[in-house]
Amino acid sequence: MFSLIYRMVRDRTLAEDLAQEAFIRAFNAIGTYKTSYKFSNWIFKIANNHTIDYLRKRKLDTISIHGSPHATTADEVSQSQLVIVSKDENPQEFVENRELSGQIEEAIGELREEYRTVIQLRHVEGYAYDEIADIMELPLGTVKTYLHRARSELKKRLSHLVS
C-alpha cells in the first residue's frame, strides 16, 4: 500500500502518513468489507481513494504570468507580471559545452589505464578515496598518487582550453 501511495505523491513522509490514515479508514470500515472480494483489493482501493482525495484537497499556489487579475492600471499589471528567465544554456553554450566534454573525455581516454580508472571512479562515479583503494585493491597512498598524477596530466593536455 505504501508503494502505491508513494508513487502517487512522491514524498516518503507524506506517503507514510497517508498509508497510516488509509489503514485507520480500513479498520473503521471493516464492517463494510464483503468477503466475496479480495481483501487486498479492498484495502488498496481505500488507500487509492484516500490519496486521490488528499491530492484534490491540496491547494496549490498559482500565479498568472500575465499579471494580477485585480490590477486596474497598466503600471499595476506590469509590476505584478512574472518574467520567466531561462537558466538553461543557450544553443551556443550547449555546443561549446558538448565540445568541451568531448575534449575532456578524449584527454581522459589518453591517460594510462590506472589513471583513467581512478579519475572515472572519483569524478564520474563519485567514490571516496578509500572506496577506490578497495575497488582497485591498491593502498590508499597509491590511489592518491594516481589521482594527483592523472589530474596533472589532464591539466597539461587541456591547458589550451583555459585562457
Image: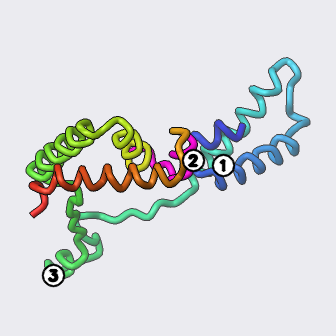
**Residue 156, relative to residue 106: is it above or below?**
below
Secondary structure type for disc 2: helix
Mark 1, residue position: 15
Residue annotated with mark 3 = 75
What is the magenta segment's predominant secondary structure?
helix
Callout 1: helix, strand or loop? helix
SS for tag 3?
A: helix
Left or right, residue 130 beside residue 158: right
Q: Position of residue 25 (x, y in %)?
A: 80, 45
Q: Position of residue 8 (x, y in %)?
A: 57, 42
Residue 100, horizontal then vertical, whole percent: 16, 47
**Magenta stretch encompasses residue 130:** yes
Distance from the alpha carbon under mark 2 to that under mark 1:
7 Å
Tag count in the figure?
3
- State the residue at coordinates (34%, 40%): 116
Q: Nearer the viewer, residue 10 or 60?
A: 10
Residue located 21% across and 80% down the image: 76
Instruction: Say left or right for 122 vs 105.
Output: right
